[in-house]
Amino acid sequence: MKYFDDLDKVINEYVKKTEGRFKENLAWTNNLKNNISISAEGPNVIISMPLYAIFIDEGRRPGSRMPPPESLYDWLKNKAIPLNAAFPIARSIGRKGIEPKPFIKESNNLDELTEKIADAVVNNIFKDIE
């Protein structure tokens, strides 16, 4: 398995770089930015984030079901907006939708990781040949 010796280093560098890109791309939302975690467990990169992140990333089309008003409570508290505004805001989201703010693909460059892993393995093979 000596060909994979540099894999941990490559993956850990990727995790740090990706974490930085998430923070840059989410500068406008402290709550989401602070609740995304990226870690490496062996050869696996684990990205965990709140469920609502997908709706920010992909948006919601107009006329879709409104989100549960309770799902807006944390956001309302962070913005110092009264909780009784949750229902009208949720209804508006259902009616008007939300423009997507694609941050997941912009922050998470898997092609870069694949390329770096391949380079590390190939370099180790060539070291062995020499």
Image: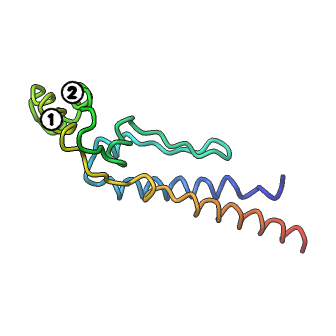
Which residue in the protein does label 2 denote?
69
Q: On the rendered structure, is 36 left or right of 71? A: right
Measured along the vertical axis of the image, is residue 5 above or below residue 69? below
Q: Position of residue 58 (x, y in %)?
A: 36, 48
Q: Position of residue 1 (x, y in %)?
A: 84, 52
In the rendered image, which quarter is residue 124 located in? bottom right
Q: On the rendered structure, is 47 left or right of 90? A: right
- Seen from the viewer's position, the closer of residues 93 and 18 is 93
- Seen from the viewer's position, the closer of residues 116 and 2 is 116
Secondary element at image label 2:
helix
Q: Residue at x 21, y 27 (%)?
A: 69
| Earlier sequence position, callout 1 versus callout 2 | 2
Q: Residue at x 38, y 54 (%)?
A: 103
Which residue in the protein does label 1 denote?
89
Image quarter (top left, top right, bottom left or bottom right) of the C terminus? bottom right
Label 1 environment density (alpha carbons within 10 Å; few <14, some 14–19, many ≥20): some
Q: Inspect the image, locate mark 1, and give the three-letter code of the amino acid beneath it.
A: Ile
Measured along the vertical axis of the image, is residue 57 above or below residue 69? below
Q: On the rendered structure, is 84 left or right of 75? A: left
Mark 1 touches mark 2? (CB < 8 Å): yes
Q: Position of residue 15 (x, y in %)?
A: 53, 52
Measured along the vertical axis of the image, is residue 10 above or below residue 98? below
Color style of the picture: rainbow
Q: Residue at x 50, y 43 (%)?
A: 47
Residue pushed farthest bottom? 130
Secondary element at image label 1:
helix
Q: Measure the C-alpha gap from mark 1 to mark 2.
A: 8 Å
Label 2 environment density (alpha carbons within 10 Å; few <14, some 14–19, many ≥20): some
Q: Inspect the image, locate mark 2, and give the three-letter code of the amino acid beneath it.
A: Pro
Q: Which mark is residue 13?
A: none
